[in-house]
Image: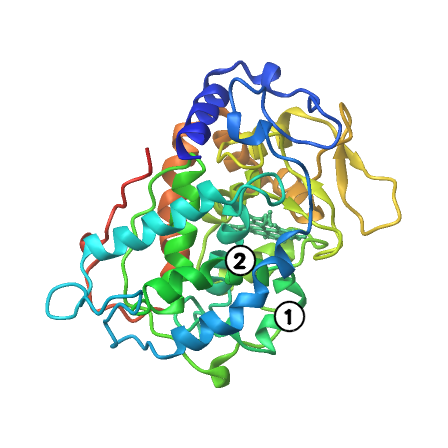
Amino acid sequence: MASAARTASRFLRSTPATSSFRPAARSTRFALPTQAFRASARRGYASESGEAKSSSNAFLWSGLAAAAGAGAYFYLNGSDASVGVKGVPTQADYQKVYDEIARRLADDTDYDDGSYGPVLVRLAWHASGTYDKETGTGGSNGATMRFAPESDHGANAGLKTARDFLEPVKAKFPWISHSDLWTLAGACAIQELGGPTVPWRPGRQDKDVAACTPDGRLPDGAKGQGHVRDIFYRMGFNDQEIVALIGAHALGRAHADRSGFDGPWDFSPTVFTNEFFRLLVEEKWQQKKWNGPVQFTDKSTQTLMMLPSDIALIKDKGFKKHVDRYAKDSDVFFKEFSDVFVKLLELGVPFTSKAEDRFVFKTSE
Ligand code: HEM
């Protein structure tokens, strides 16, 4: 998976702009040419297979996992081997968690466009993006999306798939908090899908249902630049950081039965690239004619989509200059995305470790 993603990523990054913008080879798939992206090529398109798939085990897993708090540093995976040094997990222990997530991503390709990676990135983002810098509430410290009402917030529709995907990992490494696991999984997915390294550090502790955040803290794709700024300024981001973060829409797709919107943003939704920005500026986007919420489609193939909040990034001068920079230079985007994604994943966490002690995980071969 990782090597296929990296191969494809290199392919995209070294191919002249226009030639990678082409209609999907198969009508219902969004894949790169087969030789460039083996993983995608063997995948069927099934938009909603994951939600129910692992949920039958979820109760069992969460029961097993419930025994583990942030301080319970023991494996329960068939042995009682202790973890880390004096019970405190080390970087090597967290690399094992990373490797397990990467292995599951590589093994379980029968979902959506062939990877659970995009929905893991969305889980990490929605767990973190509830932060409010004024009150210090929300953020990645707590994993309160495990509980209703937060799990039922409209913005979180579909994320049970991602939470369930990670439960067997939590059961295998019960010493890790859900909050650390979800953010680590976001970093892992970015790396495994061909993106930049995302330095990460542990220290989040799970909270109970009382810490659930109110509905409405996450952005609404139907809205424009004023709303986007309100939401992200509340978290403490500036315009450049907002644009970089939304570049994650190179990954995955919208699902009509989750958000109401439908379709992928580019032709390689399981590879992290700067294609979202390139297509935003190079393609002509017109309103889609359909019986659904207002969204935009590319004039050339009418198979891709942009949300009104994505189009806001080219309507607004302050945002557009960063869209242009990232469309032109993938390396700059990768660097600035990594920096701001690290910041996102750390919102609201009272770390005792220093920033320079972050771990850089080894991506799979
Ligand atoms: C204005 C800001 C944003 C809005 C309005 C927005 C909205 C949306 C919507 C409506 C979807 C489709 C959900 C579905 O139907 O499955 C989506 C998917 C996604 N978003 Fe965002 N988003 C925003 C920012 C971000 C950020 C900051 C990230 C990560 C850093 C991100 C990562 C993703 C990913 C990876 C998916 C694909 C998920 C999948 O394939 O299942 N988004 N977003």
Residues at marks 1 and 2, CA–CA distance in whole angstroms: 15 Å
Residue at horizontal 46 percent and vertical 52 percent from the top = 238
Residue indicated by mark 1? 153
Q: Nearer the viewer, residue 363 or 203?
A: 363
Q: Nearer the viewer, residue 338 or 168?
A: 168
Q: How many marks?
A: 2
Q: For the residue marked with disc 1, what is the amino acid? A: His
Residue 178, by quadrant, is bottom left
Q: Secondary structure at mark 1?
A: loop
| 324 over 175 or under it: above or below | above
| 14 over 27 or under it: above or below | above
Q: Secondary structure at mark 2?
A: helix
Residue 7, by quadrant, is top left
Residue 347 position in % (x across, y down): 39, 64
Q: For the residue marked with disc 2, what is the amino acid? A: Ala
| 78 over 365 or under it: above or below | below
Classify mark 2: residues with Cα within 10 Å, few (<14), some (14-19) or many (20+).
Answer: many
Residue at horizontal 48 percent and vertical 19 percent from the top = 11
* Ligand 1 within 8 Å, label 2 CB: yes
- Image quarter (top left, top right, bottom left or bottom right) of the C terminus: top left
Residue indicated by mark 2? 162
Q: Nearer the viewer, residue 157 or 128?
A: 157
| Residue 138 visible to the viewer | no
Q: Nearer the viewer, residue 61 or 188?
A: 61
| Residue 219 visible to the viewer | yes
Residue at horizontal 35 percent and vertical 63 percent from the top = 172
Residue 55 position in % (x across, y down): 58, 65
Q: Which badge, 1 or 2, comes first in the chain's sequence? A: 1
